[in-house]
Amino acid sequence: MDMCSGKDAVEFPGRTRAFEQIPNRELDHLIVDDTHQIIYCYVPKVACTNWKRVMVVLSQSLISQSSGKPYTDPEAVPPDLVHNSSLHLTFAKFWRHYGSLSRHLMALKLQHYTKFLFVRDPFVRLISAFRNKFGRPNEDFYRQFGSVMVRRYGNVSGSLPETAAEAFAAGIKPTFQQFITYLLDPETETESIFNEHWRQVYRLCHPCQVKYDFIGRLETLETDAEQLLKLLEVDHLVRFPSGARNRTAASWERDWFAQIPITMRRELYKLYEPDFELFGYPKPDSVLH
């Protein structure tokens, strides 16, 4: 609230705008469950697969192939299916469901429903996104982003392999520095908005316009999840899936940024500073000095 009121002197786009001014397309991360009166803003690379699984179970939006009934255990929901956007009712879809009533309905639900999101150290989230999307062959991300990074910021002459698999086999993949260069390049966002895996949380979830009742942290996911399910009064209905064990650790931050020039690290901090400040993450001094 201090950040949003302007007390903290860190300016960021959209800080002062009203909820009504947020375009529909920027409300696509707010998932609504009317049955239990919950709104969840999902942030990729912050346990969003498991929270989406919980939402699918609560809203009974997916039928199990084996039982013919809605899933009752989040752990049983196939993780690849859960990212299918047709499963979730988001604010962005309200327009086609409710027409001119949609803004009024959003306001009502924001007032009465319990709203939550989960956050994570912004730099660790970036490392996680990079590892997940570019550290192994991923056709979509290679075509849309990886090949662009390599072509633009790598010294690759000639044509690039067509597929991620071929590129990987030839040892052609973006480096972490190329990824950071891409994020800092002003050209990047003139072409299209940051992909959700590296878009800032304040741009995905609008914390100055949406008064969240609960903000959990990935760093304390297990205890936060337990507390949240009680707050939502659904702890008798679902249990949060037990953790993914290949999690990117904060202690790796130093090593990952070791090869990145200090000027770039500081520029990157500026880009994600609102997220650090809004959600109480300490300035990563070991990386910035």
Image (spheres, rainbow, N blue to C red):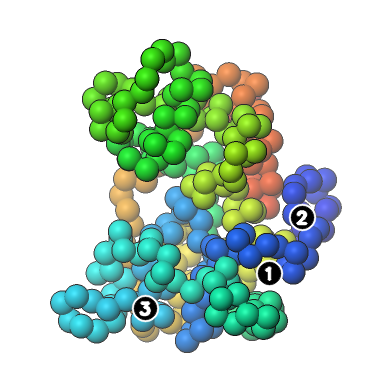
Q: Distance from label 1 to label 2 (Cα)?
A: 13 Å
The amino acid beneath tag 1 is Lys
Please report the residue visible at 41 percent of the width from the left and 13 percent of the height from the top: 157
Please report the residue visible at 47 percent of the width from the left and 86 percent of the height from the top: 35
Q: Distance from label 1 to label 3 (Cα)?
A: 26 Å
The amino acid beneath tag 3 is Ser
Q: Mark 2 — residue?
A: 15
Q: Mark 1 — residue?
A: 211
* Nearer-N-terminus badge (1/2): 2
Decide which of 56, 240 is in the foreground and name it.
56
Residue 65: x, y in percent?
19, 75
Please report the residue visible at 50 percent of the width from the left and 61 percent of the height from the top: 42
Q: Secondary structure at mark 3?
A: loop
Please report the residue visible at 25 percent of the width from the left and 69 percent of the height from the top: 76
Query: Could one spot residue 188 in this view of the protein?
Result: yes
Q: Mark 3 — residue?
A: 61
Near mark 3 (Cα within 10 A), the count class, few <14, some 14-19 or many ≥20, is some
Q: Is residue 140 above or below residue 54?
A: above
Query: Could one spot residue 111 in this view of the protein?
Result: no
Q: Secondary structure at mark 2?
A: loop
Residue 30: x, y in percent?
55, 67
Residue 289: x, y in percent?
63, 23
The amino acid beneath tag 2 is Arg
Q: Is residue 15 left or right of 44 when viewed as pictured?
A: right
Q: Is residue 170 left or right of 204 when viewed as pictured?
A: left
Decide which of 102, 136 is in the foreground and name it.
102
- Can you tell which of label 1 and label 2 is closer to the viewer? 2
* Nearer-N-terminus badge (2/3): 2
Q: How many marks?
A: 3
Task: Pick the quarter of the image with the N terminus.
Answer: bottom right
Q: Is residue 195 above or below residue 98?
A: above
Q: Distance from label 2 to label 3 (Cα)?
A: 34 Å
